[in-house]
Image (cartoon, helix red, strand yellow):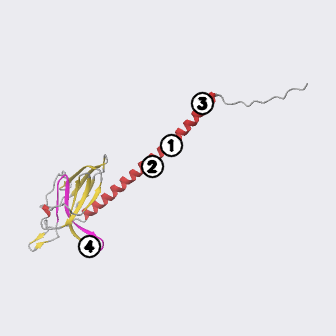
Amino acid sequence: MGCAPRVSRARGFTLVEVVVALSVLALVLLATVTALRTFANTQISLERLTGRVDELRNVSSTLRDLVESATRGDNLEGLTLGGPSHAGTFVQGNQEQVAWKATLLFGERFGGVYLVRLAREGEQLVLRWQESGVNDRNARWANTPSRSMVEAVQDFRVAYLPEPGAEWQASWRADGPPPAALRLQLRSRDRWWPELVMRWPR
């Protein structure tokens, strides 16, 4: 009698091996998802940081240009016996706002001497402007042209330096010479901006 053929049995995975394999696969997938999430969060953080840097650069550049364009002259009020004159220095403000007279250009053909004001309005840092007139000290700013400089403002402070080496002051009167420098402190979105200190043209 011949021998019966031997049937070969393939060895299957045990339950323990299956559980271990699935656990390893789950760990690999978890690590991959975590890495992708970390990468996405890093990308978002970088975009936010880049946005803040760009905002800081744009606001700083605009304000520095406006201060550089401040009018100069001995005629502090910008008045003459013959009527209003746009020449002369004008700076006035307190801890919450500052106004000054500056030469603005709108395009190539339009411009002139304007009274500008930087102040916090609600949760915005707003720049307003209007034509300089006889009574700049008591200028009314409602319904004047404006531009929002910074959103989500939580704190805004202005200080004035009379002379180099002196102490900063909380207010400035328009009936004297301009300050030596202007300091702006701003807090937005739970972060303090770097102090912006601008030398005033004399």
Q: What's drawn in magenta, residue-wise?
A: 89-108
Secondary structure at badge 2 equals: helix
Report the amino acid beneath label 1: Ala
Report the amino acid beneath label 3: Val
Which comes before the other along the chain, label 4 or label 2? Answer: 2
- The quadrant of the image that shows the N terminus is top right
Q: Residue furthest top?
A: 1
Percent of width and height locating residue 162: 17, 56
Which comes before the other along the chain, label 3 or label 2? Answer: 3
Q: Is residue 34 above or below residue 183?
A: above
Residue toward you, 11 or 136: 11
- Please state which of the two labelled residues, at mark 3 or mark 1, is closer to the viewer: 3
Secondary structure at badge 1 equals: helix
Residue 189 shown left or right of residue 31 in the figure: left
- Residue with the mark numbered 3: 19
- The quadrant of the image that shows the C terminus is bottom left
Magenta stretch encompasses residue 51: no
Spatial separation of the CA atoms under disc 4 and disc 2: 43 Å
Mark carried by residue 35: 1
Residue toward you, 127 or 167: 127
